[in-house]
Amino acid sequence: MKITRLRTQVVHLPIDPPIPTALLGMIRSADCILTFLDTDEGITGEGLVFSINNRRLSVILEMIRQLEDLVVGMDPRIGGALNAGAWKELNFLGYEGVSIVGLAAVDNALWDLRGKAAGLNVAHLIGACRTAVPTYASGGLWLGGSIDELQAQARSFVDRGFRAMKTRVGPTDPERMVARVAAVREAIGPDIGLMVDANQQMSVKQAIRIGRMMEPLNLTWFEEPVICHDHEGEATIRAALDTPLASGETVYTHRGVLRSLQAGACDVMMPDLQRMGGPTEFLKAGHLCEAFHIPCSSHLFPEMSLALLAGLPGGYYLEHMPWFESIYREPIELDANGHAIVSDRPGWGFSFDPDAIRHFSA
């Protein structure tokens, strides 16, 4: 089998209602570049990367196209050659930013192709450790909602079968922020996991203060309180709190994860498949986490991250963000414990819907 062509398709997925965030402003759309690797045997691998509000999407698209020569003609069974070659090709541009995002798009599709060629889900291709992965609802409980809206949405997540969920806090008015988190805890009871994300908006002192105020609420973790590159600050906050600290979604490649682990910056690592540079790097990051006895969660991309977390001994929570589900044929299913079920379907186990692609295409 040989890869004969790399294809791309841009789709614009509206987020309605728009989401107010402290870090990115108002999020109105998730704009994706779907990547396809065709072969001479009629099997096609699929993957995606994205941007918020259509920002710099054309730059990412061109980066993906520039990597076509690394995969055309390749036997997908020798897929490790992609990253080996890419590290040399990307050295001049660097191993962060758009170059790594472009690599992720190609590597995502390549792993799907390898799984389909073998007739195995990616989780089984790498040797699954579990048949289902703990997951949490992340597509709600935003800063813009009222207390009543937060509580109603939290209860709706429980009614849908989720056994964990995430809400958000900002850097100002800590008493009000903690009251919002307390209202969610009141709505869901003591047995549902509750994460809190500060989206990198706090100083170290602010994070320690609000973190201590939230400790009676029995949080699963407190996420990204300070700017992503301040590993020293994260380590200081981690040492000051009993609540586990989560971070890692904004670091690039397994090398960035290693630096964070060496700094003692978090209790839970949550690599982002896009910023890792694809599954090859994501798995390296996961195994580094195992060596440091740190659980590995995921950031976004649940349809692909599910299989990878299932294949990691230290795989932890899957972030269930619904932004991309409208372009997939198959939904993620939860078992009776609120865990995401690993599919037996080959590749990622989730395939793009051609009708949806036409509907949302640029």
Image (cartoon, grey):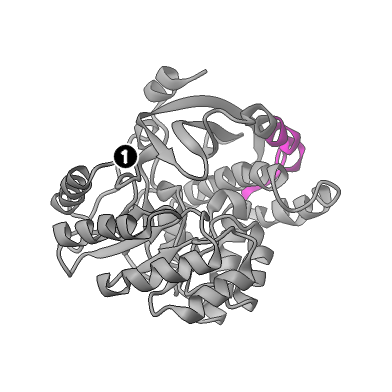
Q: Residues within 10 Å of mark 1 (few under 14, many from 20)?
A: some
Q: Assign a secondary structure to mark 1.
A: loop
> Which of these two is toward me, 11 or 15?
15
Observer-nearest of 122 and 222: 222
Taking the spot 52% from the left edge, 18% from the top edge, the residue there is: 362
Estimate the x, y position of residue 280 in percent, counting from the top left: 61, 58
Q: Which residues are magenta?
A: 62-76
Residue visible at 36% across and 37% down? 325
Q: Amino acid at mark 1?
A: Glu
264 is within the stretch colored magenta: no
Residue 178 x, y percent position in the rendering: 31, 61
Magenta part, dominant SS: helix
Residue drawn at the location 50% of the way across and 81% of the way down? 239
Residue 201 against residue 130 in the figure, above or below: above
| Residue 86 seen | yes
Residue under circle 1? Answer: 330
Decide if residue 143 is on the left or right side of residue 201.
Answer: left
Residue lying at 56% horizontally and 81% vertically, measured from the top left: 291
The answer to whether residue 319 is above or below residue 4 is below
Quarter-of-image position of residue 1: top right
Q: Position of residue 257 (x, y in %)?
A: 62, 66
Magenta span contains residue 75 = yes
Q: Left or right: where does residue 205 sit relative to residue 102?
A: left
Residue 348 visible? The answer is no
Q: How many marks?
A: 1
Left or right, 299 with respect to 57, comes to left
Identity of the residue furthest to the right in this view: 92
Residue 54 image offset from top left, x and y in percent: 56, 28
45 vs 269: above or below: above
